Image (cartoon, helix red, strand yellow):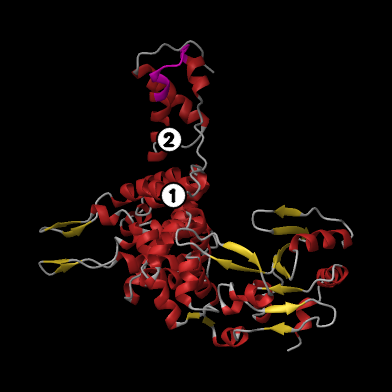
Amino acid sequence: MNYKDALKHNIFKIISQSANQLDLDCYVIGGFVRDFLLNRGLPKDIDIVAIGDGIQLAKQVSKNLPNKPKVQVFKTYGTAMLRYDDIEIEFVGARKESYSEDSRNPVVENGSLQDDQNRRDFTINALALNLSESNFGDLLDPFNGVQDLQNKIIRTPLDPDLTYSDDPLRMMRAIRFSAQLDFKIEEISLKAISKNNHRIQIITNERIVVELNKILESKKPSVGFLLLEQTGLLDYILPELMALKGIDEIEGQRHKDNFYHTLEVVDNIAENTNNLWLRWAALLHDIGKAPTKKFSKKVGWTFHGHEFEGSKMVYQLFKRLKMPLNDKMKFVQKMVFMSSRPIVLANEEATDSAVRRLVFDAGIFVDDLMTLCEADITTKNPKKFNQYRNNFKIVRDKIIEVEERDHVRNFQPPISGEEIMATFNLKPSKEIGIIKEAIKEAILDGDIPNEHKAAYDLMLKEGKRLGLTITSQK
């Protein structure tokens, strides 16, 4: 292979010239080289290692670029970054690292390229291409990373026990790369992750969530979550999921393993949407089942109210992991809270009234809710699977029909509070809320159409029932 093909972009020539002007050797290393060899296209970020001052090299490159991009310097880390042609380029001097037991932040010293490659997390990320003018495009592969790429293996350059203990985030990264690339983690490396799983506790929740998101965004997220479970990392990260694992049996009655069921649902949802937060909803849709599980001699195992309990747990989980507590969290909460509603409709006759209420409560997210519920079909019985799918299709068709007629997805009451106040000469009072609620319920029940005239007539009727006097009438 001609590795110079990876360096066709103009930026590499400019970096090479800049390094030559400073009499430095430099290399492009890591993900850029890996992704080129995997034919994954030009990444949006490039890592450059200089044998010397990486910050100085970044400034020289900026001088030589036509638009003189701003150089961001991170003195704490000894790195610098600039953006060119929608690509983020990070520069760092070659270094060697040593770690203390209670931190993943290393003590850094200047080092050689070999030192820098030794400190890389995996052999496939230690690949480097020479950018010096005399050896431009030469590959440096001290750990047989190319062979590991070909064999689809995740392996550490040095002793995995030391690699993972030094920086425990690498355990998450190993699993994330396995999920993203469909690579196998080397057996020795996998055992080292299990041995060091407790070390994940020194990693910030924010960094852990970045890796969780990438696992969830992979083509088949269950690959990553099964590895997290197998290595014991999931016990520390998402104990709510681990609580779903296992099957209890009393008097010959068993329930399904809700952990493995959940992973099937996540894989199903991943086939149908790239929406990260809907994937989170799939991952968490049953977390309320562990605390609500009960056995009754009459009906067997029950999980009454697990959707409500689960929606409360979503907030607690997001807060603990320092995830956003904004509309994204509220979306996941709503999906978890409503996750059984379409299932009930699909198993019964979907009346107009029930469908109207579903659309009203789900609002603009009703399609996401239906996608989640369809992903929740994990039965291996082909007859039952087709029956459930057909039932959901009936509900979807009914939603379209009701929505076209009644417009309740973005429900705005045909009668405003101001109009009620003007009609009955009212100041803000509970009567206004009573009338608005009566109109809303009548529309959702199908007693009146979602139109102003019908709502106005009902307003007058309700006002009379409440003993209000009409002072203004259209």
Question: Dot 1 lies on which element?
Answer: helix
The correct choice, above or below, for 88 with respect to 137 in the image is: above
Number of numbered discs on residues: 2
- Tag 2: Cα neighbours inside 10 Å, few (<14), some, or many (≥20)? some
Residue at the image point whose x is 39% and y is 52% from the top: 336
Would you name the residue on which mark 2 appears?
448
Q: Which residues are magenta?
A: 424-433
Left or right relative to 291: residue 68: right
Would you name the residue on which mark 1 appears?
318
Could you say which is closer to the camera, residue 208 or residue 288?
A: 208
Query: Horizontal and vertical percent for residue 173?
Result: 52, 68
Query: Label for residue 91?
Result: none
**Residue 143, picture quadrant:** bottom right
The correct choice, above or below, for 304 with respect to 3 in the image is: above
The amino acid pointed to by label 2 is Ile
Left or right relative to 102: residue 308: left
Q: Nearer the viewer, mark 1 or mark 2?
A: 1
Residue at the image point whose x is 42% and y is 64% from the top: 375
Query: Horizontal and vertical percent for residue 277?
Result: 50, 55
Q: Which of marks 2 and 1 precedes in the sequence?
A: 1
Q: Is residue 389 visible?
A: no
**Residue 255, picture quadrant:** bottom left
